[in-house]
Amino acid sequence: MTAFGRAQGDLVDWEIRSVNHRYLEVSFRMPEPFRDIEPALRELVASRVHRGKIDATLRYAGQASISPRLNQGALHGLLAVVEDIRRRVPSVGALDPMEVLRFPGVVQDDEDNLARFKAAAQRSFGAAIDDLLDHRNREGAKLDGLLRERLELLEQTAASIRELVAGQAEVLRERLRRRAHELVEQLDGDRLEQEIALLAQKADVTEELDRLDIHVAETRSSLDADGPCGRRLDFLMQELNREANTLAAKSVMPQAAHVAVDLKVTIEQMREQAQNVE
């Protein structure tokens, strides 16, 4: 589900975005010194979010930064090596201070200061998740209403198909009589009725409509239940679409075929919305 969460503090700021995804996928963008707290943050996300692609970004707040400090031992060791090289190769020029600072180990983060920043990042991350979930819940309430509206429309459409196919056997009988009259002068009444019964059986959609009603009831039950239901809705949309395809294929009457297409359109709209549901 598309949503956004934010938490701002004196030391760090979090921004968390989520978009639709079949499973839970979490990615972090944060300064390198914070990488060791990432596993704990992932566990927190997994305990509260079950579906979606989550992108979390950590930034220093305002002018806040982790104060670096010189590692005196590493610096003296580096200078001793450079001095030794100068004795051996007098043409070596003066050192660039920025190059010295970039040498691994010469500049280190202040551990006490870094610990404060990490603690602040972990605390505010929970607040950002709260904000994200609030946003998702508001969007979820809207989706719930949209899906329920589509379910009612689907039920109305299915009822229309039931009414239309009620006289399907008589339509088949007349159609077959006309064709038979074009081919032979004398009709075998028993044979004709057998053919009509066979065609009516093949065109019978009662079972499909009954299964459609069951899937609608299951969809409504999933929406009423507590907890995540997105994956279950995905499955139910597949089942609804399967029944709609069969209805369209078996429709003998043109009006019923048109209504079956409307049914498929409604189910497709529901499927698109269901992908946003956790």
Image: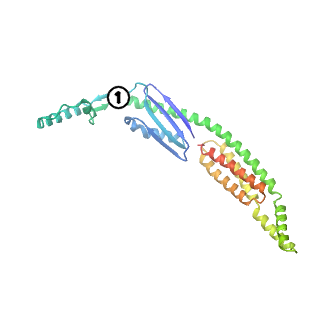
Q: Position of residue 119 (x, y in %)?
A: 42, 31
Q: Nearer the viewer, residue 176 or 217?
A: 176
Image side of residue 18 versus residue 142, left or right: left
Amino acid type at circle 1 is Asp
What kind of element bears circle 1? Answer: helix
Q: Position of residue 171 (x, y in %)?
A: 83, 61
Q: For the point 71% across and 42% down, which residue is it? A: 149
Q: Is residue 224 visible?
A: no
Q: Residues within 10 Å of mark 1 (few under 14, many from 20)?
A: few
Q: Is residue 226 above or below residue 111?
A: below
Q: For the point 17% across and 36% down, which residue is it? A: 81
Q: Which residue is mark 1?
A: 112
Colouring method of the image: rainbow
Q: Quadrant of the N terminus?
A: top right
Q: Position of residue 12 (x, y in %)?
A: 44, 29
Q: Is residue 124 above or below residue 263?
A: above
Q: For the point 66% across and 46% down, which residue is it? A: 269
Image side of residue 28 versus residue 89, left or right: right
Question: Hey, which quadrant is residue 93 in on the image?
Answer: top left
Q: For the point 15% across and 37% down, which residue is it? A: 85
Query: How many marks on residues?
Result: 1
Q: Is residue 260 visible?
A: yes
Furthest toward the front, the residue is: 182
Q: Is residue 12 above or below residue 46?
A: above
Q: Position of residue 132 (x, y in %)?
A: 54, 35
Q: Quadrant of the C terminus?
A: top right
Image side of residue 148 versus residue 98, left or right: right
